[in-house]
Amino acid sequence: MTIPWRNLESATGGTKVPWVGALSLALLVAGACGGPDAAPASVDGLMTKFIDVGGVQTRYYDYGQGEPIVLVHGGGMGGASTANNWSRNIPGLAERFRVIAPDRLAQGMTGNPRDDADFTNQGAAKHLYQFIQALQLGQVHLVGHSSGGGISFYMALEHPEVVKTLTVLSAGPQMPPAGEGPTQFDAILAKCPPDPESYEHRKCRLLALAHTEETFPPAYEAADEYMGNLSKAVETRRRMDARRAARPGWPNDENNAYREQAWEKARSGALQMPILLFTAKQDTLSWDAADPHAMMRRELGFFDIVGAKNPRVSMIVINEAGHFPYREHPEEFNADLMQFIDFESGRR
Amino acid sequence: MMIPWSDPGWHTVCARSTLWTLVLSLCGLASGAGDASGQASVSPTASVAGLEATFVDVEGVRTRFYEYGDGEPMVLVHGGGRGTTSSANNWSPVIPLLAKRFHVYAVDKSAAGMTGNPKDDNDLSREGEVKHMYQFIQTMQLGQVHLVGHSSGGALVFFLAVEHPEIVRTLTVVAHGPGMPAAGDGPSRHDLAEEATCKAPQTTYEGRKCRLELLAHTPNTFDEEFLRADGWMADLPKSRQARAKYAARGAQQQSRPREDYRQRMWDRARNEGLRVPVLIYAAKQDTLSWDADEPAAMMRGELGFFDIVGAKNPRVKMIVVNEAGHFPYREHPERFSADVTHFIDFWNRHP
């Protein structure tokens, strides 16, 4: 569709804007604003919504009715992984629950924090809580994957009153290590192209974590690529690099200290809601390279922490899946999650 | 007839009781009359928890079992045994729960509970136990069954699934057992506790009873009625004979033949692939799963077993529950029943 010079001139108050540029601009603006036009960032036909959370524009998916399940993706700030991770689970869960999957702070289509100090796990947990409050969800079934499992664990410790059940998927940075040495994942990652910002590296990394080649189809990769190259994502990396340079040890020292505190609180019984740990036998992140097979040391160590004074902790390990078991076996994961929620609800 | 262990005159009472049992067993009846002091008695079928067991002849071996419910057949196989502790009574808390959805058969293994000894002493072996259970399933014409085995019964049902996959719908293996690799390189936490606490040898009832109680995590996992029935069954002449024969076999043979059989089963599972859905059900405080060097149980045995049965089988799942020891189905019966039912239901919907 062509936009005649004259019409555009009058529409824009006399400013001369090349029509191709105008169309691109319109698409970009529409893309950033969300709605059905947010196609480049969305997958599997999912409709996007946005909400302001303490001044941070936050993207989320929202499907179904009933008790809310909040799905929290993994990955790192300014990098890969977004609410898109849950695309294969949302429809099934939405048959019985209201399923909400946000992009975390500084990830996906969600904006950066105002304060650089919030580029940490603690900042992400705070944003997640504010998001739940902004939508007025009340008590939720919180489900977090990988680092999102960590964020969910931290949020549940800070605000147990809004967490009905907690599900932590796969190994995450909030868990003890897999063993003394490197993991199987470390060994595979070492063979990936070195530049962590490059598409090739990210794709290699994702394949190292996935068990199958179908885990991340091209459409998923394209959306991920699009979001990773947004100016706000570039901004995330710039701001974090600057802060890292100014504060040696940041953010790891802070994240580690926060984690130690969280373990202390959990061990002394701060978390009393039902907790499910869900993981897969071929997750290379849980596999000490010295072992012939993954021995789930991270998840089992975490089990001991959250289960120290909480009888309602359990763990499920499934087969033929890597770090994204919920994508690789969506029906099995959905069924097990709903079974866990139903059983624990029945006891109340 | 009751067994008053602490009574100084128990040898006489015991001998008299034994003679009575022998006489009445020959008549196909065993009377459970209370003794003169009026203490609680054991039912003639050693049944517990308001359930009632019955008997069937399996290739000449009188076999006791519980049968409850309607639906797809499910066979529950207890652990321990071999003339000492454990019988189908172990399953008493979950039989009524599982019977809501399944046709449940909880069977005393060969030479265990009230089931008779095999005709051939060579069948006092893992292969013999497996054969007997297979023959029970055939005798009762159950067709394809959901197999659920605990501890050494878990090993039995695994071996049965490898030997006779055509009769297995799903396989559930509960808690650490001899069908699994070891928990670690050294002794388990349980081994150390047993050594320190249980003075009677493991070939005696006293020794096995001590072991049983150590393996439970929750107090009162085994109530008085259970222990009375268990002790009574262990004191039956056929149980004493079984214990004596096992002890003799143990002295004669090394454990080599048993390990060879298990290794063959592992190899077949790995190479041919078990094609049925498998559920491995474990508990975080099972001291058999806990290498004594580790601060907590790391389920190495179960995870190693996962690798064996999961080598060519996508439909393997492991569940680990908290605050439970070696008998999670007794300690958390509703949770256990719900988990097993859900596992079966899911794979029925996704064949």
Image (spheres, grey):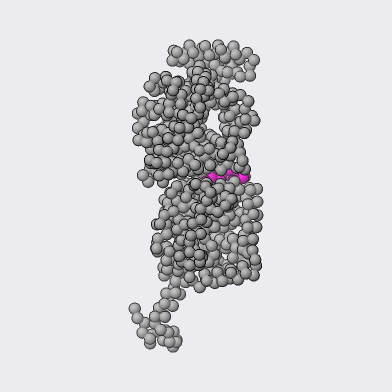
Residue depicted at 38% across the width and 27% down the height: B135
Residue depicted at 60% across the width and 27% down the height: B210
Q: Where the N terminus of chain A falls, by quadrant?
A: bottom left
In the rendered image, residue B294, in percent from the top left (x then y), is placed at 61, 42
> Left or right: where does residue B350 sit relative to residue A254?
left
> Is A158 drawn above or below residue A303 in the view shown?
below
> Left or right: where does residue A261 sit relative to residue A230?
right
Asked whether B40 or B236 is in front, the reply is B236
> Left or right: where does residue B144 sit relative to residue B155?
left
- The magenta stretch spans residue A314: yes
Asked whether A147 or B225 is in front, the reply is A147
- The magenta stretch spans residue A105: no
In the rendered image, residue A264, in percent from the top left (x then y), is placed at 65, 51
* Residue B229 visible in the displayed image: no
Q: Where the C terminus of chain A falls, by quadrant?
A: top right
Quadrant in the rendering for residue B202: top right
Judged by its main secondary structure, the magenta piece is loop
In the rendered image, residue B214, in percent from the top left (x then y), is placed at 60, 32
Residue depicted at 36% across the width and 84% down the height: A4
Asked whether A103 or B192 is in front, the reply is B192
**Range of the magenta residues?**
A307-315
> Is A256 drawn above or below residue B175 in the view shown?
below
Quadrant in the rendering for residue B268: top left
Residue depicted at 64% across the width and 60% down the height: A253
